[in-house]
Image (cartoon, rainbow, N blue to C red):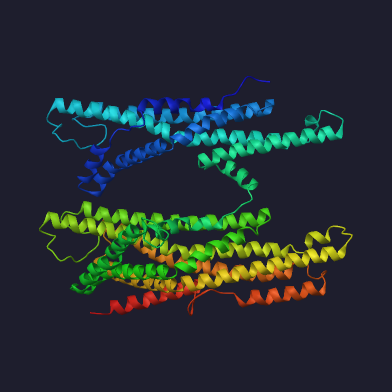
Amino acid sequence: MTSEIKTWEALTYQWKVWKFFGLVPPQEGSIWLNCMQSKSVSEFCENGYMAVTVIVSNLKFLNSYFSLHNLLKVRPILKELDKRAKSQAEDQILLKGKNNARKCFMFYVRIFSVTHFTSNLIVFLAKERRLIYPAWFPWNWKDSFTYYAICYVYQLYAITAYAVIEAINVTYPSMHMCILSAHIEALATRIKNLGSKEAIYDNNSKKQEEKLYKELTECVKVHEIITKILDIIPTSNVKAQTFISNMMTEVNTWEALTYQWKVWKIFGLVPPQQGSPWRLVYIVGTTAFNISVYLLFPITLIVNCFHSKNVAEFCENFYLTITVILCTLKFLNVAFSRKNLLKVRSILEELDKRANTEAEREILLKGKNDGKKCFMFYARIFGMTFLTSNLIVYLAKERRFMYPAWFPWNWRDSRKYFAISYLYQLQALAGQAISEFVNVTYPSIHLRLISAHIAALAIRIENLGLKETNTNAADFNERDENLYKQLTECTKDHDIIRNLFRITERTIAATCIFQFMSTGFAQCTLAIFFLYNGLSSDIKLINNFFFFLGVTFETFDLCYYGSQLQEEYRNLNKAIYSCNWMDQNKRFKHALLILLHRSQTFTNINAYIVPITLPTFLKVMRTTYTGFTFLFNIK
């Protein structure tokens, strides 16, 4: 045996630096304030990339601070795992993982060192006084050598600190994953050798079985220990994630809707229980917030539309106005459909328990992950739209809002009223943006989860009778009874899915209609606005591009997942035909015919009378073009 392996030592540098910093990062105020004084897009980008990096570095450090109690738990767990290595092959795997983790750290140290060195060369080789990176200071350092020296030394100290802390905080997740992967690979080697000739030392079969069972029990314990680390540290390593997910049996498709319910709780749709001392405070606070977002804010946009002087100005005001109004209607639909939405969780949890094979679990996991990706895609789109709308204000030469709006005071000539109006619009737009991508994604996620459960049910039905025909069963009656019981379970699952289908259809119908209208109106008026004003090369064009992209993909996703659901129902019918029904008794065939008839009655999901399919998306696009032509011909 080799000497003791301490994989924890790979993280030694991280803990030394965290101890040195005392978990208190420097401030980024001077760089951030300098961004606010940018005079053009290019100057903003020059100042902004470092400012954003520094702010995100702060957030990483704060995350490390709040995760400190969890990170401290990792060391004893890794020590315990190191002691489990019993063979030369396992020792080599762990040593390789430890060395790879250190190489990862040293690679980033070299990268950040070269970056820091070249940034100082910029100062030394400059013909005039300049800082390492553009920054704002409350004194004139360009005309004073003393002030310049103070600013340069401070920035040198701050950037050095940031470089060190960034190298630490950006590497510890990768290093944890590297070490964790090594322990998983060592465990896989141990499991693979169970029952091999090298693992059997006694000719007595009972002792051999006891020894093997003991070794297997040890492997199970190691797996439980690794699972503890996974609970502490979120894994992004594909190899580790695949290995662990294959050993897990529970699938919670409901988790794809976690973000939606968290946001709905913030917006007042999930109040505390009766008798809670916070219930009244919650209701009053969320009611006031919702009035400011869903009532007062649309009024400012609607009134401004009536002040439009021409078609181009009307279109500039209207595309956001109609989107906000329909967003409010979507929120009201969610509020009135809350009881139905609450039923979905118990139904999905019941369906998740039916997944018994690896193929079924993989399908459900893919559906769940697709739902989360759908949410994150729109979060990024609306995040970019919100960011660029604020840049419009920051880069404007005169006072203006993110979007044209009316206020009952003269905000153009008063800094105080402008600040009040801008902050209110900032808060209202943030609320509308979050509400919009939450309320527009839950129908798509519901449709994707239903499709996944239908696909899992199709696999279950298709395999009926196939395994049993390949075995020599002595009691055919018992075999037939088992098959009929499995078919009955599949029929019950289909009934549960039909119930989920009906609830989802009732819940999302109004939202889908509002979404089709929102896409049509927004695309039409944006196109007219571009036609009258041209495609300028400022930040307004980028903002309108992300807005256009968001409202278009909202409808496309709905129709795409609706068509996918339709296709999965067709595949379910094929699966019923594909099972081994020919060798079964009359009772089995009769029950299978009933299931086939039921599966053929639900082939499409509708928003009232409008089918949620890709052809509907094309009809929305054609309707938009018709409206564009009509407005274009108005003189």
Q: Is residue 538 above or below residue 574?
A: above
Q: Nearer the viewer, residue 487 or 575?
A: 487
- Quarter the C terminus occupies: bottom left
- Quarter the N terminus occupies: top right
Residue 531 in sight here? no
Q: Residue at x 47, y 71 (%)?
A: 507
- The image quarter containing residue 430 is bottom left
Q: Is residue 90 above or below residue 38?
A: above
- The image quarter containing residue 157 is top left
Q: Residue at x 44, y 71 (%)?
A: 512
Q: Residue at x 36, y 55 (%)?
A: 277
Judge from the rendering whether residue 437 lies leftward or rightward of residue 594; answer left or right: left
- The image quarter containing residue 499 is bottom right
Q: Position of residue 510 (x, y in %)?
A: 43, 74
Point out the residue furthest to the left here.
Answer: 413
Residue 522 in sight here? yes
Judge from the rendering whether residue 179 lies leftward or rightward of residue 429; answer left or right: right
Judge from the rendering whether residue 6 lies leftward or rightward of residue 595; answer left or right: left
Q: Is residue 550 above or below residue 158?
A: below
Q: Nearer the viewer, residue 546 or 280?
A: 280
Point out the residue furthest to the front here.
Answer: 275
Q: Position of residue 417 (x, y in %)?
A: 14, 58
Point out the residue furthest to the top here.
Answer: 3
Query: How many numbered tags mark residues here?
Result: 0
Q: Position of residue 99 (x, y in %)?
A: 55, 27
Q: Position of residue 41 (x, y in %)?
A: 25, 49
Q: Nearer the viewer, residue 604 or 229?
A: 229
